[in-house]
Image: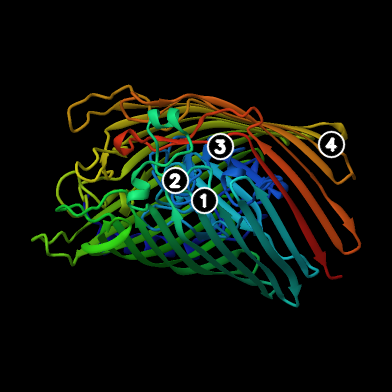
Amino acid sequence: MKKINSKTFGACATVLACLLPSVGQAQNNLLSLPAQTVLGSEVDAQDIRIPVARDTVSGDQISPQSLGGNLSETLQRVPGLVAVNRQNYAQDLQISSRGFGARAQFGVRGVRLIQDGIPLTMPDGQGQPSLFDLDGMQRIEVLRGPLTTLYGNASGGIIQGFTNEGSFYPTLENRTAIGPDNLWRSRLRYGGQHGDLNVSANVSRLQTDGYRDHSETRRDIANLRLGWDIDDASSLTLLINSLDQPETQDPLGLTAAQVREDRRQAVSGTDTFDTRKTARHNQAGLNYQRRLGNDDKLTLMVYGGERYVEQYLAFPGGGQFSGGGVIELDRRFGGGELGWARNTLLLGLPVELAAGLTYDYQGEQRNGFINNGGNKGAQQRDEYNTVDSQDAYLISTWQLDPRWTLTAGLRHSRVEFESEDDYFTDGQDDSGGVDYQQTNPALGLSYQWNPSLTVYAALGQGFETPTFQELAYQEQGSGLNFGLQPSESRNAEVGLKLRHEQTRVNLALFQSRVEDEIVTGPNQALTGRSTFVNAGQSTRRGIELSLEQGFDHGIEAYLAYTLLDARFDSYTTNSGSDLSGKDLPGVPRHSLFAELSWQPPGSGFITALEAQSLSERFATDDNDARAAGYAVFNWRAGYSHQVGDWTVDPFVRIDNLGDKEYIGSLIVNGPGGRFYEPAPDRQWLVGVGLEYQWR
């Protein structure tokens, strides 16, 4: 793609600025669209009229009598998502949305991660779900569909978390849980209102030897939220997040034969090269909001942080162009957003406008060293990589009449990658850069059939750039793979939302056509390291359904089901193999989560039976390797009892009641046929929460 010049971006900013004085008088608030707060994130009464697939997980659903340390515990109940715990904390969770992101061998791609308006996804598109503050979370919202492409570099949707404010009375709480394989997690949480300042803070530690060999983990997390009501018209929120995860062992994937031999084993290279990963992440963000009169709202968000990663891989990496078997990344990142929203009249119709400018930056020192039996050897790579991202957007929501609502938007994005090579021992300079730019429109229309039922339709265009990790290696030679292009998607969706008494239904039918799908390419011959290529065209078609029904006596039933047909329409590999018509790897055709819970009113007791199921998934682009489908059942129970200012919450959980052996996650196109990451057999967890509140 051609490089965007400064005049093009400046023109977008000028157009947005010119809109400010042209709007008229404000009307009643229709659909709130403040900057950084993603479309659809307001109260549920407004959600029914927004033409986007949206599911909210809140309250006890976020960590229902569970460990509380993994986002997969929460997201498994959302249709359209596949979120699995890989039993490998060195590589984090595996999350995909409508098939986007299934290629990720670590981290999250294709889905944007946001907490309290501050991005947890880096400017290059890679996110780390372990950064979410699950201990302080009020709710998590998942949005899919064409309108989500208005929020930048992602194709599959948005996962956004909202931190709970501290309680009015100072409250201190500890929650501890233990399980098999020396699993232990404990958190300490404090919240309270001190004058105009609201405080919410927590610290936690997770330790485990791991289900598989060579999986020992220790993860420490600290989070702080300070909210200050400056006056009646303005507020300021400060967020600080810190993660320290030293020397996390990496068991790597297994072949099918190794799974049959011993599903808990780690491959021999894990001991030979002591495969492990250290990660440290510190981040802070400020979100300032001010209402100007009754018409306008301004939002200013700034954030910044640092991330350090050191990873020991299962090969020496001493050959020419190999880049080393030890990776060291030292990253600095930051950015901001200026947003404006107004309720007004245009063309005689009530309309809400939201416009904004964003800037994000990522600078990373990347070093590579030889892995000498688990020790750092001679240097093999030395480069400094940067990502520079600039966006401008405009979103409008029109009330065409009391029942019809139109949402339309436009976002222009520019993402620039640059690499400065300082390693000249190999006799060449691999410095270079590439710019990607795209303007993405989206349009949605909803009709409120009656106060309980809304139907909607939406169209949109999106794009997804490769991450720096996907650009990092070529099949042959050294330097970044600047020939890799971003994928472009065209998305369509129709759906309905029903809210009636104790019944909630969401139904969506969707289709996405993708050009230049980014897929895992040939592995490097000497290292087995993954490279990435573009794969022509692909299509995703599917149905998402969620149904929640309440009954008398505290009984509730919930069902989430997804049917997804995701396949390559046109894909010929570099070796000449025609894979057109093959299924996208890592994407199940059917996925289901169901839950039946009972909470007798006023008793403090709750129990539930859960069911989870995924159909067959392919591990490779050619569909020659696969993981069988499975269905497992889980049971949980808890009790909350208050004595004076104290509250005690014991709980118990059993996962995989039937002790079924199955593959939990796949390493798509992994080297050496090591595609498989087995899930645990029957597991137990017991814990207790203890809370004290000063009144």
Report x, y in % for residue 619.
Answer: 38, 30
Disc 1 from disc 4: Cα separation: 41 Å
Of residues 372 and 243, which is closer to you in this image? 372
Give the number of the disc on residue 680: 3
Q: Is disc 1 surrounded by few (<14), some (14 to 19) or many (20+) residues within 10 Å?
A: many
Closer to the eye: label 1 or 4: 4
Give the number of the disc on residue 396: 1
Give the number of the disc on residue 319: none
Disc 1 from disc 3: Cα separation: 48 Å
Q: Is disc 3 surrounded by few (<14), some (14 to 19) or many (20+) residues within 10 Å?
A: many
Is residue 164 in view from this perspective? Answer: yes
**Residue at x-position 38% and y-position 41%:** 267
Is residue 345 in view from this perspective? Answer: no
Closer to the eye: label 2 or 4: 4
Q: Is residue 66 above or below residue 570?
A: below
Q: Are marks 1 and 3 in contact (CB under 8 Å)?
A: no
Closer to the eye: label 3 or 4: 3
Residue 202, quarter of the rendered image: bottom right
**Residue at x-position 42% and y-position 52%:** 152
Disc 2 from disc 1: Cα separation: 15 Å
Looking at the picture, which amino acid does disc 3 mark?
Pro
Q: Is residue 618 above or below residue 318?
A: above
**According to the image, label 2 marks what residue?**
149
Closer to the eye: label 2 or 1: 2
Q: Is residue 315 above or below residue 425?
A: above
Looking at the picture, which amino acid does disc 1 mark?
Ser
